[in-house]
Amino acid sequence: MANETGLAVSSRLAPADGKSAFPFDNRYARLPERFYARLEPTPVAAPRLLRLNEALACELGLDPAHLATPEGIAVLAGNRVAPGSEPIALAYAGHQFGNFVPQLGDGRAILLGEVIDRAGRRRDIQLKGSGPTPFSRRGDGRAAVGPVLREYIVSEAMAALGIPTTRSLAAVATGEPVFRETALPGAVLTRVASSHVRVGTFQFFAARGDGEALRLLADHVIDRHYPEARERPDPYRALFEAVIARQAALVARWMLVGFIHGVMNTDNCSVAGETIDYGPCAFMDTYDPRTVFSSIDQGGRYAYANQPRICHWNLARLGETLLPLLSDDDDKALAMANDSLASFQSLYGGALIAGMRRKLGLFTEEDEDAGLAQGFLDALAKGQADFTLAFRALDPDSDEAARPLFGDAASYDAWVVRWRERLAREPEQAAGRRAAMHAANPAYIPRNHRVEAALAAAIERDDYAPFEELVEVLSRPYEAREAFAAYADPPRPEERVSQTFCGT
Ligand code: AMP
Ligand code: MG
């Protein structure tokens, strides 16, 4: 998999001003060669910067002005390898829709390296759509402008919502077509992640019976994400439990905003607990727990309501890979893993009800709160109300905004009596309740019709204004802004988007 270094023509040039665009400090590339393939991105014809995330660049300790220069753009397009970069495509496996594939890997992504951000956190800088790799199978290694902008919009929206996620640093048009059903303009996304280690990365080595690699990988993940596990008597079990806790909290956050990932394969499940791989993901408009958007998810495996169960399933697959690290005694290892896995339900349930209390303006806890929250969801379903809008419209003192959102107002009326009775048992009518509710219930989410409209304008008319405005609106999702009021609206019937596509 590895190619010899030094034998090929290299595009490694020092920048004219002697400044490196990225102060790389790479750890993953120190792991054994069987963890990845070393290769450089494939240059593209005519890089054009579509979008640079200046705030994120600053957070990473990078100079946005430098990134926007032709040299910086060349790095973001994969045309130039910055000093200190050790580009690699990562090996991983994964269960796709329940079927195990022993080798997937970065088929169209290349990790440029890692940087330490301003807060001291290690972050991966990866190009997505940067050309074929040894893991490409039949794919072209490329990405189209549409899916790249989509990932940019949704991942940045998730970050602004406060949900752990990979980030988007830049989108660069390649000036080359990619061929899907039709020819589409190509692009490269620069993705930033806490790491790109997936459940599928563990599966890759487990499937090969490579216990040494599993241990090295587990140690790498502990050092990088869960250093506290090292202090525990059983660090690998502590690692497993820490991943369970983060994934449970993550999926609860998705459920609380109506996010549907769409492809929760184990290769798209980050051990750092970030949302990763934005393909056919989408936010639900009208509340329906069975909602599925992905065109390829015909069985509804990854429907909204299934997400916690699938997350639990994915974590079971992670547990299987860790068995040899837990104990030399197989039965003991299995018992330990299952014991740890059993915590998922209560961790998930706890995170969900805590979030629901915030959404309903409850500062105290009562046993019946879960029933109250479920009652609201049932009313939403019955009234075919918009999930985001209905939570946002809830007002302890008035039904004016919320009630008209329910097609069947009787279900709202019955529920709201219960809610007000519950609020009356709160220790005080806290003045901050409405503000606290607004901080938990976004006004703006990346609604499909808005996302599709922004992509269409960019691709069909080279008009990036709708994309830019949407990104701006979604950067402060909890703050209603007069000029952007229409972005809170659900789609009109003719605007409704019922399917999304992977776009790979
Ligand atoms: P995804 O469904 O995007 O999570 O990708 C699943 C697998 O397919 C991963 O191994 C990807 O690297 C690979 N893949 C997706 N799109 C392409 C492409 N255009 N070229 C090569 N590999 C791809
Ligand atoms: Mg993937």
Image (spheres, rainbow, N blue to C red):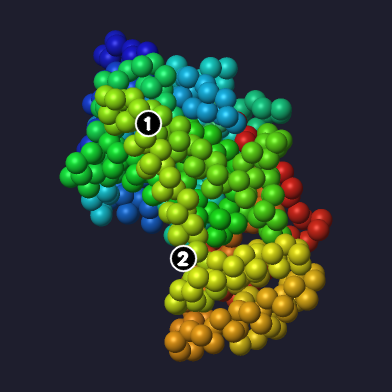
Give the side of residue 18 with respect to residue 43, left or right: left
Q: Position of residue 128 (x, y in %)?
A: 47, 34
Residue depicted at x 32% and y 54%:
59
Q: Quadrant of residue 162?
A: bottom left
Q: Position of residue 15 (x, y in %)?
A: 28, 35
Q: Position of residue 439 (x, y in %)?
A: 48, 72
Amino acid bearing label 1 = Leu
Residue depicted at x 47% and y 19%:
103
Question: How many marks overall?
Answer: 2
Residue depicted at x 47% and y 50%:
345
- In this orientation, does residue 138 appear? yes
Per the image, the residue denoted by label 2 is 354
The residue mark sitting in front, 1 or 2, is 1
Amino acid bearing label 2 = Ala
- In this orientation, does residue 462 appear? no
Per the image, the residue denoted by label 1 is 334
